Amino acid sequence: MLRFLLNRITQIVVLLIIVSIIGFFILNLIPGGPLAQYALDPGMTQDDIERLKEQLGLNRPIYVQYLDWAWRLVRGDWGHSFRDGAPVLDVIGGHMFATLLLMGTSTAIAIAVGTWVGIRGATHRYSTFDHVATIGAMIALSIPTFWFGLVGIYIFSLQLGWLPAGNMYTVGEESVLDYLHHLIMPSIVLALVHIAVWSRYMRTATLDVINQDFVKTARAKGLSERRILMKHVVGNALLPMITLAGMQLPSLLTGALVTETVFTWPGMGRLFLDSISYGDYPVVMGLLMFSAILVIFGNLLADIAVAIVDPRIRLS
Amino acid sequence: MTAVAANPGQGRWWRNRAVRRFANHRLALLGFTMISLLTITCFIGPYFLPHDPLYIDLSVRFTPPLVDGYYFGTDPLGRDIAARLLMAGSVSLLVAFSAMLMSIMLGTLVGLIAGYRGGWVGAVLMRTVDGFLAFPSIFLLLALAAALKPTPMMVTIIIAITGWMEVARIVEAEVRSLREREFVQAGRMLGLSGAHIMFREILPNAMGPIIVAATLTVARAILLEAYISFLGYGIQPPLPSWGNMLGGAQQYLASAPWLAIIPGLAITIAVTSFNFVGDGLRDALDVRDDRL
């Protein structure tokens, strides 16, 4: 296990370095580069900007600038928001809960529904259910998340009036039930694509397991089909799904950004868009780096979880 | 000296079987038909419509569908949605298709070099692929779109930048497995250059997975264009795209729902069609793909 961990951690460090180089490159693409903040200020003359460049060390070789920027990232000094001067990490932290709540609920829905659909599709292979699920999954993957959200709002908020059209809670009545009421539609909207992905993978994984010798043995022992399915098949089929959960993180974050926009959900996605339209580049860069780091560590967690459950992985 | 020569007769047999399998794949055929119809309608249709997609007439704003010769109604500026939808379709399809071409070229090049050279060159290239994959695509897209001027060309390039990694991975894996095969060794023994072996010997044998990936990349590119244009950082009005037609639709959802429903349906139909075709091609070309 220790060797496995060391191995993974080395890979992660390399990955973090590459991600930070890509991030630094984008930072320097931004008009005005790291000085964009001052380009907005009409009181700044060209001489002032030159002097600032000197002061901030922007005349140094590019690799020295990169190392300096990366070192500040590592130390947690991610700069300050242009809007209110708050440290970028604090701003991000303030919006993290809403996004994680949305992503967590969505993932739970996607796993529950996707697993059920996938297993049923595999045990009833080529049945009507299986065909409908297959085609349905492909259509679900093709629906733009924001459009699905708009249709949902039109039907359930505007026509039926059952669910709120946006926000995380009603001002003045912030109960758990109220949160849940607001959470229903955005989390289902965000879950749709992932239900499709989970069900497809789960179907394949179940089919892989169903034909293994240990399932035949279980059947030969005279176990009931239900017991075989629950105990032997599902457990083993779910194993590769842990890795899938990690792999889905980038697309989950992408979906969350879009969903948050449609439902005015006060998470990191909305913060990202607000910061872009405001020209608040430190927060934009911070969120870009933060999302990548979240993805990398999410995948590490998934790998560790698989290694804990499955000895074949950590011993190979 | 291609693979066809190395395995005589295999090329034609493979092609026939693939075509037959594709033709037997009902969803793929449906998708293929839809794409053809959609493309023809979007590029030729505007010439047959009575209204100009850019003509503003505030006196007919918010006309519901099927009224006064406006098949899909009008938008908040009184422009004909049917005409705009077709023009937007040609823009979206063109952007998606060009982005796919760029992604495939970049991804194939990176995958070929990484797979064939291996060693530290391959390691550096493939870790770069991993690095790009760590960014959620929309965050990367929007950060780039915010930094660069969103002309249609730039939007295409930005979408391509976020879409080449999967292809690179697929090609790299394919090339790595082909690298030590006899026909490649024979080429090496004949003294062929590395570039010749990569592009003329190995690449033709990796075309199956690349074609499948290309189809799915178009689907992805249509969706991503829609996302960033919907959010206001993609194709800029007055030039319509399926995404930016939806951009202002949310505020009129109660009074003019067709503004949101119609372009969204167009996107869904187009993307579904490409996914169906990709699925059919995967079966026809015997490509094993773990993505779905």
Image (cartoon, coloured by chain):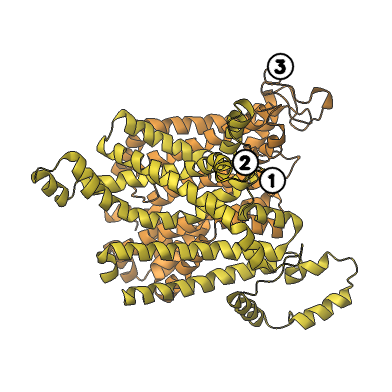
Chain colours: A yellow, B orange
Disc nearer the start of the sequence (1/3): 3
Residue B179 picture quarter: bottom left
Residue B158 screen position, x and y as percent: 62, 55
Q: Name the residue that disc number 1 marks.
A: B235
Say which amino acid is labelled 1: Ile
For label 1, count other residues whose C-alpha is less than 10 Å away and answer few (under 14), some (14-19) or many (20+).
many
Dot 3 or dot 2, earlier in sequence: 3
Question: x, y (%) of residue A262?
Answer: 63, 42
Q: Which of A184 and A30 is in front in this view?
A: A184
N-terminal of the two: label 2 or label 1? 2
Classed neighbour count for the residue bearing mark 3: other residues with Cα under 10 Å, few (<14), some (14–19), many (≥20): few
Which residue is pictured at 40% across the width and 66% down the height? B115
Q: What numbered label is drawn on residue A62?
A: none
Amino acid type indicated by mark 2: Ser
Relative horizontal placement of residue B241, taking residue B181 as reference (left or right)? right
For the residue labelled by badge 2, is the local secondary structure a helix, a strand or a loop?
Answer: helix
Pointer 3: what residue? B67
Residue that carries the numbered disc 2 in the rendered image: B92
State left or right for residue B123 relative to residue A306: right
